[in-house]
Amino acid sequence: MGKLMVVLPTGVLIGILGLGWWLHLQGQANGDSLVAMSLASLGVYPVIAIFVVGIPKMVSGDKVYSVSEKWFYGYLIGLEIVAILVALYLMGHN
């Protein structure tokens, strides 16, 4: 349940990103700010989530990761990489 609560905000941020793209395609000016805000949040959120979720694991001294934890951390790291690459692409082409 705890990991699901960490993953849910990424869905909201991706929804805001989609809304921003749709508004941008409709020619409305506030779509650009929504795209920028959601991409910045998608770039910062996984770092904070990994830090907050990893603190109890580090404090307990547990060095073994289950398969679900590996998928969870892989998801957050992959999300971070994709957000950075999309942001770099948009900075270079706009």
Image (cartoon, helix red, strand yellow):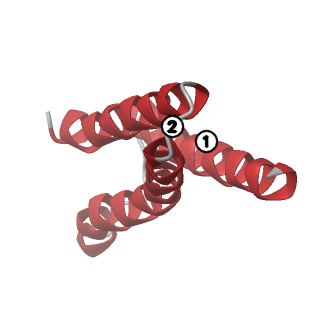
In percent of width and height, residue 4 lies at: 23, 33
Viewport quadrant of the N terminus: top left
Seen at 85% across and 49% down, the residue is: 93
**Circle 1 — which element?**
helix
**Residue that label 1 marks:** 78
Q: Is residue 2 left or right of residue 39?
A: left
In percent of width and height, residue 77 lies at: 57, 49
Q: Residues within 10 Å of mark 2 (few under 14, many from 20)?
A: some
Q: Is residue 17 above or below residue 38?
A: above
Q: Is residue 32 left or right of residue 64?
A: right
Residue type, numbered disc 2: Tyr
Which residue is at the front of the view, 8 or 21? Answer: 21
Which residue is at the front of the view, 49 or 87? Answer: 87
Q: Is residue 37 left or right of residue 55?
A: right
Q: Is residue 41 left or right of residue 35?
A: left
**Residue that label 2 marks:** 75
Q: Is residue 52 above or below residue 7?
A: below
Seen at 45% across and 31% down, the residue is: 67
Seen at 53% across and 54% down, the residue is: 36
Q: Are marks 2 and 1 in contact (CB under 8 Å)?
A: yes
Q: Is residue 19 above or below residue 33?
A: above
In percent of width and height, residue 30 lies at: 44, 47
Residue type, numbered disc 1: Gly
- Most distant residue in the left direction: 1
Seen at 38% across and 36% down, the residue is: 16
